[in-house]
Amino acid sequence: MLHTDIPTESELRAIAAVRSVHCITIVLPTGTLSADAERARIELGNHLDAAVAQLEAVGADAADIEGVREGILNLIDDSFFWTYQSQSLVVFATPERVVTYRVPNLLTAEVQVSDRFHLKPLLRAVSFPHAAFVLAASQNAVRLVEVTIDGSADEIELADLPSDSSRIFATRGNNGSARLIGAEGDKVLLGHYARQIDDAIRPVLAAQHVPLIIAAAEPLASILRATSRYDALAPDIIRGNAETMSADELAAAARPILDALYADEVAALAARLTEAIATGSGSADLSDLARAATYGALSTLMVDIDRTVSGFIDEHSGALTLSQDEDAVDYGVVDEIARRALLTGARVVAVRESEMPGGAVAAGIMRFPV
């Protein structure tokens, strides 16, 4: 099982708001096996050495360097922590504290030292959380399963959820309606059953924004889809007999559906960005994006999670200066554009290079021209 701790939106904004003399961001793939974790512990020590070297190169105070070193060494020595890992680890450290996030995305190892944290490693996990609900239903049984980002699958107990369709079909003889006779009558009664199911799960789904995936055979699958009032209903279903599938098997079957769903979402967003750039309401030019982010003019920003461009962005004008150096003074300007966009309420999505419109390192849609 993956052990993840993805930041909430408010936590991410709090991380984005941190400014300190020395902010260290360390990213490393960890894997979930004990051998992988041991390798990652050693690699974290190497990354610590690299961060300390950058701090020493700019004349950082010895006490600050020791604070960073002590905090990360304490993390390295925490055997219990290393027992439970996800695919990658993101470490945020200052001389005063160390904060970690275990994420299910396979990230590229890197060390960033600046006066602000490097956010892009977390943005991918926040952009596409890969969580869902699975509604597994047949005439004989119905379950609502929550699939979490760490890979676990938990059945949710709902008092009003019908155990099966028997009570609905028992009304056939008492109703007297000719519409309830035969195969067509079965479909009508399944519609009543589906409405009961939808009523029962609605309170759970009301505050959620993750996909709902139906696992059912026909014709019930189509009837459930037609009845559902949930606005994040996945277009694909898990086919076959849901009765025989465990919660874990349902979660495994949901993963490719989620992958396809998010791939479609990324492609649609890239198409919107391409159109916005063509019509002048968007840009893939870093200078334009830096100014727009500074003035709160970005409504949507897509960034390449892997590529880093070093430099500076003026705090007030948003003027961009690129740099060939990677030290404790400069920072990743794409990450800084994303940070400023987040803090001014923009939607920020992190993707791979192949998913970026036109191969750009960043692209955005403007709220207003700057």
Image: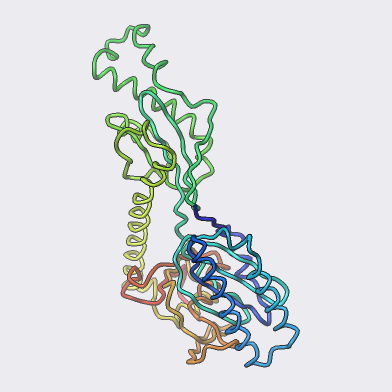
Q: Nearer the viewer, residue 343 or 250?
A: 250
Residue lying at 59% horizontally and 82% vertically, measured from the top left: 113
In the image, residue 231 sits, relative to residue 86, either above or below, namely above
Most extreme residue toward the right, as rendered?
63
Left-right relation of 276 to 109: left
Q: Position of residue 17 (x, y in %)?
A: 63, 70
Q: Position of residue 341 (x, y in %)?
A: 52, 70
Most extreme residue toward the front, as rendered?
35
In the image, residue 347 sits, relative to residue 293, either above or below, namely above
Q: Which scheme is used to colour this image of the protein?
A: rainbow
Q: Position of residue 102 (x, y in %)?
A: 55, 62
Left-right relation of 306 to 184: right
In the image, residue 210 sits, relative to residue 284, either above or below, namely above
Residue 345 lies in what quarter of the image?
bottom right
Most extreme residue toward the left, as rendered?
183
Q: Nearer the viewer, residue 275 or 6?
A: 6
In the image, residue 24 sits, relative to residue 135, either above or below, namely below
Q: Position of residue 219 (x, y in %)?
A: 27, 29
Q: Nearer the viewer, residue 36 or 207?
A: 36
The number of numbered discs placed on residues in the rendered structure image is: 0
Residue lying at 72% horizontally and 78% vertically, measured from the top left: 67
Left-right relation of 39 to 185: right
Q: Nearer the viewer, residue 368 or 134?
A: 134
